[in-house]
Amino acid sequence: MHDIDVVELGGQSRKGRTAFDLGRDLKFSTAALESYAFARWEPLIYDAMMLAAAVEYADRSTRRPSLGWTRTLTLRLPVHAPQRWAAPDIAGRLQEALRFLTGDAWTIEFVKRRSDAPSPTQQCLQLPVKTKAVIAYSEGMDSRAVAGLMAATLGEQLVRVRVGPKAAGLPGKGEREPFATVPYTVSARGESSARSRGFKFALISGLAAYLTEAEEIIVPESGQGAFGPALVTAAHAYPDYRNHPLFLKRMERFLAALFERPFKFSSPRLWHTKGETLKAYTALLGSESWRDTKSCWRGAQWSTLNGKLTQCGICAACMLRRMSVHAAGLEEPEGTYVCDDLTAGTIDGSVHNDFKRMSQAFREYAIAGTLHLDHLADMAATGNRTAVERHAIITAPSLGMAAKEMGDLLGGVLDRHAAEWGMFIKSAGARSFLRQWTRQDQ
């Protein structure tokens, strides 16, 4: 069990509990907060941000057990209106969403803040037209493509909400852009699984929808990214539901209880592969902007060449990207990835000559990333159809669909993923190290 007290400036944690010190472990940007300065601002918004930060701290600072997965986490969080947060329909739905997302047992206690929190000081932002939808926006390829596709229909009625540590920073001097960046960063280390990221992104997007009175929160993930991590898990790991309809439905219920209005998450590319999404984006807009997006999951030590941050090229996210670029009939220049030459006979021979950090850990991570996509392709096989149908039965109600309809749609995505994966592996050549790792026909 890990007990954590969120401590305001000048306070201290109770005996035997870890302190999440808001003056030490949280960097809050008042300048970034100004991009949330809408007329509907209220202390509840700040409390929700502190909740997301506290959950992130607990998740990232508490190691998972060496055997098993589940942790028991308790949080005490100071808020402006603790009675509201502690109401069963709010606290219960919050803890249900967190348990489902992370696979952990969460207990959250709400107490009264010692002092009022800061609020935006500038005049309220005004949008030129009524907002219909918000979309979580990062430098990822799905994010760029789906934002472009949806903007072609919605125009200025679509508002981008920048999320993630590598999202673009604040607007230039004199400019005011809504939701320019997440207004806080958390300092924590110890656990790398970071399953709470989905909660952070969903909650921040929900706050943006509330402030702009948007009807819809668009999730840019394509089918492989939404369903793949839940269908194919590694070893003892709990399924990853961060973009899955079952988690998003739970977030809808929590946000509706907290803000007393309906929320709707939608995934317009749920029944498409990433390659199909990229192809539709480039065909519609003739855009080359996808080329400067980043997909890599790995840290700088595994994705830096000659002092320049690139992409590792072999983690599951990079492999899905490369497969999708191939499926869309596009190409990327040499030097885009550390692991650049997929035609090589060994992974050691595939990396750029200037990369000096090749290790067994790099090789094992590469194998895991490749096998994730290979195993997802296996889900299209007749022998795995029962598992797919079972997943559809569980998930369909969250989408308001019949199980048979969802099973057919999910099966179609898996079939097309398998076809794209097979063609991608084939394109690497018969001597590629990828052919040695995968179960694709020789």
Image (tube, helix red, strand yellow):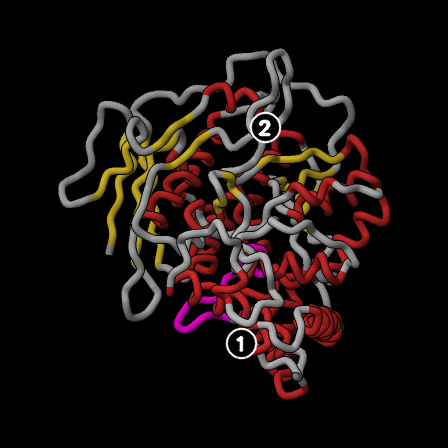
Question: What type of secondary structure mainly makes up the magenta span?
Answer: loop
What is the number of callouts on the image? 2
Q: Is residue 262 above or below residue 353?
A: above
Classed neighbour count for the residue bearing mark 1: other residues with Cα under 10 Å, few (<14), some (14–19), many (≥20): few
Name the secondary structure under disc 2. Answer: loop
Q: Quadrant of the C terminus?
A: bottom right
Q: Nearer the viewer, mark 2 or mark 1?
A: 1
Q: Which residues are magenta?
A: 233-246
Q: Residue furthest front?
A: 353
Which numbered dot is residue 231?
Answer: none
Q: Residue at x 64, y 23 (%)?
A: 177
Label 1, on which residue? Answer: 437
Q: Position of residue 200 (x, y in %)?
A: 49, 44
Q: Give the image location of residue 134, x and y in percent.
A: 68, 38
Q: Please state the horizontal and vertical placement of residue 221, each as a whole percent of the image.
A: 65, 53
Residue that appears at 53% across and 76% down: 437
Which residue: 64% across, 51% down? 334
Q: Which residue is mark 2?
A: 180
Give the side of residue 265 with respect to residue 76, left or right: right
